[in-house]
Image: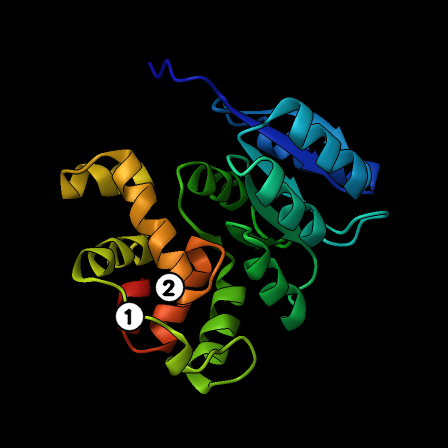
Amino acid sequence: MDNHPAIRILLADDHEIVRKGIRDFLEEETDLCVVAEAADGEQALHLMVELRPDVAVLDIQMPRLTGIQVAEKGRTICPDVRVLILTAYDYDPYVFAALRSGASGYILKTARSHELAQAVRTVYNGGSALDPQVTRKVVEHMTSGSPYSRGEGMIEHPSEREMEVLRLVVHGLSNRDIADKMGISHRTVQGHLANLFGKMAVNSRTEAALLAIKLGWISLDEMA
């Protein structure tokens, strides 16, 4: 029997009936618990700060603040809250803006209930969760030199140790798993990631992984 506490979730969507459906899906899982709901972005940000949920599941199109704005502001105010964007839109600018905001995942509302539940677990554990349709779109952009790319001259190449961490990030390992695999502390992993984000001018693990693919540091096979 798993005695770990349930993952605490904030759910934000401006349509009540949609929130109810998503909540019902999530709470079918014994390890997930929706602790609060928000009907607009300002309320979502307020609840993120007040309740410090483990994961905030945010729609993009909401009154007052968009889900992307909430993710960006939340990254500064309560960086320990993981953000999963759940939306009907796979519009390119939304996808890339969400990744730049520091969101740990981007899932479409066409996802099945178990896929959504697994995405919540993934971001909670420090990983990145992208809808397969979104992943294809992002990889196409990253490999074609389209928007969201950066000139290689603007990037400082990571150290050998930082590259080892980056490879494990690409494989989807959480900070804790990386620490265990490398035989270092969780705090040291966080330090390596902070250095990576600074050198690569990115704000999230997902963005770092995708930029590493774009720059050819890591092969596409390592995204599997």
Q: Is residue 22 above or below residue 164?
A: above
Residue 18 versus residue 194 in the image, above or below = above
Say left or right for 224 vs 108: left
Residue 25 screen position, x and y as percent? 61, 34
Residue matched to label 2: 199
Q: From the top left corner, tell me how far across and down residue 216 is, in percent.
A: 30, 78
Q: Where's residue 173, x and y in %? A: 30, 46
Which numbered disc, 1 or 2, marks the residue that appears first in the sequence? Answer: 1
SS under mark 1: loop
Q: At 69% across and 46% down in the image, what residue appears?
A: 70
Label 2: element kind: helix
Mark 1 surroundings: few (<14), some (14-19) or many (≥20) residues within 10 A: some
Whole-percent x and y of residue 17? 81, 37
Q: Which mark is residue 157?
A: 1
Task: Let me know if residue 201 appears in the view.
Answer: yes
Which residue in the rendered view is the most extreme toward the left?
Answer: 183
Q: Which residue is depicted at the point 32% across and 53% down?
A: 169
Residue at image coords 68%, 35%: 11
Color theme of the render: rainbow
Amino acid under label 2? Answer: Lys
Q: Is residue 91 visible?
A: no
- At 76% from the left and 42% from the top, the residue drawn is 13
Q: Is residue 185 above or below residue 96?
A: above
Q: Tell me where residue 48 sits by quadrant.
A: top right
